[in-house]
Amino acid sequence: MTQAREVLYCGFCSLPPEYCEFGPTLEKCKEWLKRNDRVAFQFLYNTLEDQLASTSLGTEDKLEEDKKKAKEAAKIERQLQKKMQSRVVIKRIERTKKKCVTSVFGLENFDVDLKKAAKLFANKFACGASVTKNNQGNDEIVVQGDVSDEIFDMIMEQWPIVPEDNIDLVEDKKKK
């Protein structure tokens, strides 16, 4: 007794998959076969060239992703290098008679919110502190009084991301 064979027919053109290439809708038939019967698809259409093309495309995508990751890592590294090379300058400036102010410049390079820092200095030292533009057009914090040493200590406590070597204490005397 012979058994009936089960024949696979394409769901798109209704021909057996071996004959889909002679029909007008080969690409759509390939897609249908790839979704429904992977073994038959690989047997009929997966040539060595297709295997090479699929592996090279996969590796190209992976290479592009690796390049993007490397570029992003390099960018982050450059930003970190820039931060580490940035300087924080604490400058004591004499005003009239025995009055002086302390200016702090360069904290914004270490992602410190200058307004919050000025408010913190004002509360800590019970004096006026504000964010102003200096002659070069950059923001700096101006604190009333000679509190440069205390500001140095406070920066070290509050913002440990700022390296101690990057903080400069400068004294600016008025010319007579």
Image: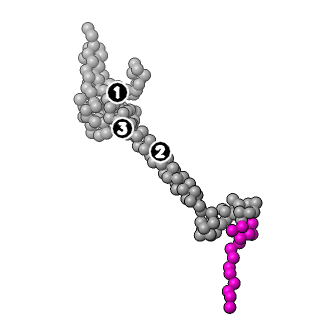
Q: Is residue 10 visible?
A: no
Choose the circle earlier in sequence order: 1 or 2.
2
**Predominant secondary structure in magenta?**
loop
> Is mark 1 in CB contact (under 8 Å) with mark 3?
no
Residue ID for mark 2? 68
Residue under numbered circle 3: 80
Left or right: 142 as drawn, with respect to 32: left
Cα distance, mark 1 to mark 2? Answer: 35 Å
Q: Which mark is residue 105?
A: 1
- Is 70 situated above or below 168? below
Up/down of 95 relative to 106, above or below:
above
- Name the image quarter holding the N terminus: bottom right
**Is residue 40 or residue 80 the one in the foreground?**
40
Residue 7, label in figure = none
Q: Is residue 146 magenta?
A: no
Classify residue 45 as left or right of residue 16: left
Q: Give yes or no for contact between labels 1 and 2 (Cβ–Cβ under 8 Å).
A: no
* Residue 28 image position (x, y, % from top left): 70, 61
The one nearer the camera, 20 or 157, is 20
Which residue: 35% across, 29% down? 106
Range of the magenta residues? 1-19
Per the image, is 6 magenta? yes
Q: Residues within 10 Å of mark 1 (few under 14, many from 20)?
A: many
Quadrant of residue 130 within the rendered picture: top left
Identity of the amino acid at label 2? Lys
**Closest to the observer: 27 or 167?**
27
Q: Amino acid at mark 1?
A: Phe
